[in-house]
Amino acid sequence: MTRKQRRLYFVLLGLLALGAAATLVLTAISDSLVYFYTPSDLVAKPQPEGRRMRIGGLVQDHSVIRDGKSVTFVVTDLVQSLPVTYAGILPDLFREGQGVVVEGKMGPDGRFLAAEVLAKHDEKYMPKDVADALKKSGQWKEPKAN
Amino acid sequence: MHRYANPARFLRLAKAILPYSSGLAVLLLGSGLWFALVGSPADYQQGDSMRIMYVHVPSAWMGMVCYVAMAIFSAMALIWKHPLADLLARATAPVGAAFTLLCLVTGSLWGKPMWGTWWVWDARLTSMLILLFLYLGYMALIDAFDDPERGSKAGAILALVGAVNIPVIKFSVDWWNTLHQPASVVKMGGPAIDPSMLLPLLLMAFGFKAYWVTVLLLRGRAEIAAQKIRVLRLAQVHASSQGE
Amino acid sequence: MESLHALFAMGGYAGYVWPAYGISVVVLTAVLAISLRQVRRREAELEQLQGARRGRRNGAAGAGS
């Protein structure tokens, strides 16, 4: 084996070991790499009242009620849903049927008290007339939760 | 003398390619900018703010493409001691860092109106920030040694180790819940983007590539000149010390 | 005129879209300018060094004959 070959195998082996180590570490800390939980996660693993967390899902249709400064709506992952109360500025993309991530904590009455609301958008980009045409022809696909 | 055979070939190649790559960059970026700002429709959800995508996404791609190139050049330099590979790795780093910085800044400018925040620590954004630090670390490391050869070696090892981050960036949106949306163009089942918006995106993306090739050739030339200057100065010192 | 106005307004997102394009132009132009200056400066220095060497060698050859 020449020195060049030895160096080649050394680099390849090093990369392989590194990749394996990275995979293991990332899998182990996967829970903390997740930016938000879904309402279903919350049902499966209830969190103590007052713990700060982020919940993501879709804003349920016809659930947004504005009452003066505060707004209430329901976040759903189409399996479980969570009622949310929020007082503050909503991002431009916030609307019913749209993805959203709320940060805050559970209130005593089972409502989620959001301190911050972030809108999430999907990976689809199209002009308005195309979107309208798709909706009209019934080929529109509703967004999935998260 | 064979050590100089390759750089000489590179200089000839650079001279031949430069007019084409720079002309292509001007052409693609010019038409791309027109389509991005004027000749394409606004998004049905995001309105005109979505036009930021036409610089944000190509910057992100180039930030990763430059890093992959840098890692491959580094591996070639480590394994085959190819003198040109080391020069090209050095020449790529600042360009990749610039693209990564642009990706982060334009993403922030897009995130504020749409998401409602300049920055979040989700997996995609964080791994992209790590990419910027890898570039900066590489650039600091190669200049940290008195002996440029040792600097190159340390830098090459860092570049290879950091390559782990590239698949993490690409797949972070699929592996973990992130605020950042999944891929639109490079995904299974074809792009989820209207053709009228794909055109400016691709024009800008190829324009950025042509720009990278242009700057890489220029910086490669500068690195070769710097190396020859070093050799000549050493010979000078050597000659004068022998003369006495 | 009307359309030009609309272009600058960017549907209300002018404060985000134009800075994004502005900084892209500035950063890419700066990287290109720095690279160009570096090439010019180093190749000029190399030329000078090589010229001095040639000159010395020629001078030495001339003195020897």
Image (cartoon, coloured by chain):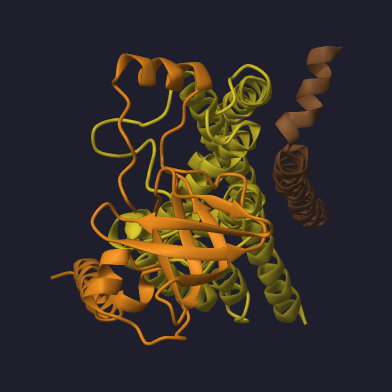
Chain colours: A orange, B yellow, C brown
Residue C8, compared with residue B184, is above or below; it is above
Count every numbered label the image shows and give the total.
0
Left/right placement of residue A23 relative to residue A114 reads left
Residue B144, compared with residue A40, is above or below; it is below
Left/right placement of residue A17 relative to residue C52 reads left
- Provide residue A107's location: percent of width, then percent of height: 47, 79
Picture residue at 35% right of the left edge, 68% below the top: A37
Find the residue positioned furthest to the left: A1
Quadrant housing the N terminus of chain A? bottom left
Q: Out of C7 and A6, give the one closest to the viewer.
A: C7
- Provide residue B207's location: percent of width, then percent of height: 57, 30
> To which quarter of the image does residue A49 belong?
bottom left
Picture residue at 38% right of the left edge, 35% below the top: B185
User: Is residue B131 in sight in this rendering?
Assistant: no
- Provide residue B141's location: percent of width, then percent of height: 57, 76
> To which quarter of the image does residue C32 belong?
top right
User: Is residue A127 in sight in this rendering?
Assistant: yes
Residue B179, compared with residue C27, is above or below; it is below
Q: Out of A143 and B112, give the one closest to the viewer.
A: A143
Left/right placement of residue B3 relative to residue B16 reads left
Q: Out of A146 and B17, give the one closest to the viewer.
A: A146
Picture residue at 47% right of the left edge, 56% below the top: A73
- Provide residue A105's location: percent of width, then percent of height: 48, 78
